[in-house]
Image: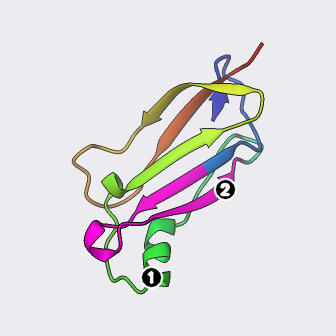
Amino acid sequence: MKDDRGVHIPDAVITITVHVPPEYGGQALKFESYTDVLGRYRSLNLPNVMFSMLGLDLDVEPSQVEVSASKTGYTMVRTLRRSKASQRRGLIETDFILAKRD
């Protein structure tokens, strides 16, 4: 995560929301993480861990996962999801650009 000048933003809140299919309860599971000093974050297969904790033997598709970011004093300028729309499995990579509020 960077600001609109290209400066890394540490300690921003990354919220990962996994949507459980309606036939399995239809709830939304949320997990928060934080960016490191380089503005990076990682969630080591978190959606599948969440499903396992619920006793669901399902593969998570990228369409079931939302990733958002926030930081006090900043507004969102752009979100770029690098995963392909047709992707069925694998990494979900999302870049965020924020701008300082005046």
21 inside magenta stretch: yes
Determine whether the residue tagged by mark 1 lies in a helix, strand or loop. Answer: helix
N-terminal-most mark, 1 or 2? 2
What amino acid is labelled 2 in the image? Ser
Going 45% across and 33% down the picture, which residue do you hit? 80
How packed mark 1 is, by other alpha carbons closer than 10 Å (few <14, some 14-19, many 20 or more), is: few
Q: CA distance from mark 1 to mark 2?
A: 19 Å
How packed mark 2 is, by other alpha carbons closer than 10 Å (few <14, some 14-19, many 20 or more), is: some
Q: Residue furthest top?
A: 102
Task: State yes or no: discs 1 and 2 in contact (Cβ < 8 Å).
Answer: no
Residue annotated with mark 1: 52
Q: Is residue 58 above or below residue 100?
A: below
Going 73% across and 34% down the picture, which residue do you hit? 9
Image quarter (top left, top right, bottom left or bottom right) of the N terminus: top right
Going 36% across and 60% down the picture, which residue do you hit? 90
Asked whether residue 57 is in view, the answer is yes
Relative placement, left or right, of 81 versus 63 is: right
At which x and y percent is residue 56? 37, 82
Q: Is residue 17 above or below residue 78?
A: below
The magenta span reads 15-35
What amino acid is labelled 1 in the image? Ser
Going 71% across and 32% down the picture, which residue do you hit? 8
46 inside magenta stretch: no
Relative placement, left or right, of 26 versus 43 is: left
Determine whether the residue tagged by mark 2 lies in a helix, strand or loop. Answer: strand
Asked whether residue 45 is in view, the answer is no
Residue annotated with mark 2: 33
At which x and y percent is residue 46? 51, 67
Relative placement, left or right, of 50 versus 5 is: left
